[in-house]
């Protein structure tokens, strides 16, 4: 009979989530492999086996954050209305951030000052915006948005949603619940209006 895998995907995800929480709440000095292993109820050997050490763990946090964001954006249905798709993508971005706030400090900040993503990790971070680029290009091709370099609109749209989400994650957004979500939705609509033909 085969031995069961002790260091499985579920343990990997639990370790990444807890590492992100520690980093987000307490800074890089709190991210010790011993503490991480204890918090998750495993051994430091398991952490080394899965990640190979702290630098690799930090890289994996970065990659996992963008993977989750990319997965959320890819799940947005592609419809015949690219402007509606753009709005839906903006909401999916927010949903991802609210579901995974502990990854944002490593994805977009300097949570670990000496961490710099390698080329493959940077490529993944850019690939996760593919659904946004696709919707922008379709809207331009349909004559709904002005004819400019699509990257200009992608940059502006990403900057807007990221700024709004960052304010919300930092507790700087007024209102709560549905009111906050409605305000976010209006900001998405109004920002796209500036790019309309």
Image: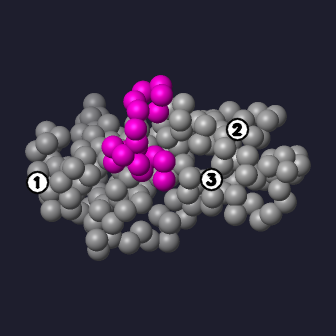
- Identify the mark nearer the N-term, 3 or 2: 2
Whether residue 16 is visible, yes or no, is no
State which mark lies toward you, 1 or 3.
Answer: 3
How many numbered marks have been drawn onto this rendered protein structure? 3
Q: Nearer the viewer, mark 3 or mark 2?
A: 3
Q: Which residue occupies 73% across, 52% down?
A: 194
Q: Nearer the viewer, residue 42 or 157?
A: 157
Q: Which mark is residue 157?
A: 3
Please indicate whether residue 111 sits to the left or right of residue 85 in the image.
left
Numbered label attached to residue 85: 2
Disc 2 secondary structure class? helix
> Dot 3: within a 10 Å radius of its alpha carbon, few (fewer than 14), some, or many (20 or more) residues?
many
Camera-side residue of 179 and 123 = 179
What residue is pinned by disc 1? 34
Residue positioned 10% across, 45% down in the render: 38
Q: Is residue 174 located in the magenta-colored stretch of the structure?
A: yes
State the image coordinates of residue 95 (x, y, percent, origin top left): 48, 36
């Amino acid at each position: 009979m085969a031995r069961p895998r002790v260091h499985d995907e579920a343990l990997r995800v639990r370790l990444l989530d807890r590492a992100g929480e520690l980093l987000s709440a307490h800074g890089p000095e709190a991210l010790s492999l011993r503490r991480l292993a204890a918090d998750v109820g495993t051994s430091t050997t398991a952490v080394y086996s899965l990640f190979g050490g702290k630098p690799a763990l930090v890289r994996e946090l970065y990659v996992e954050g963008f993977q989750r964001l990319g997965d959320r954006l890819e799940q947005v249905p592609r419809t015949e209305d690219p402007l509606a798709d753009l709005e839906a993508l903006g909401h999916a971005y927010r949903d991802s951030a609210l579901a995974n706030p502990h990854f944002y400090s490593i994805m977009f900040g300097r949570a670990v000052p000496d961490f710099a993503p390698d080329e493959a990790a940077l490529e993944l971070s850019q690939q996760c915006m593919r659904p946004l680029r696709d919707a922008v290009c379709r809207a331009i091709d349909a004559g709904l948005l002005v004819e400019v370099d699509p990257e200009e609109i992608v940059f502006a749209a990403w900057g807007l949603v990221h700024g709004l989400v960052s304010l919300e994650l930092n507790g700087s957004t007024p209102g709560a619940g549905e009111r906050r979500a409605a305000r976010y939705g209006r900001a998405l609509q109004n920002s796209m209006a500036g790019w309309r033909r």
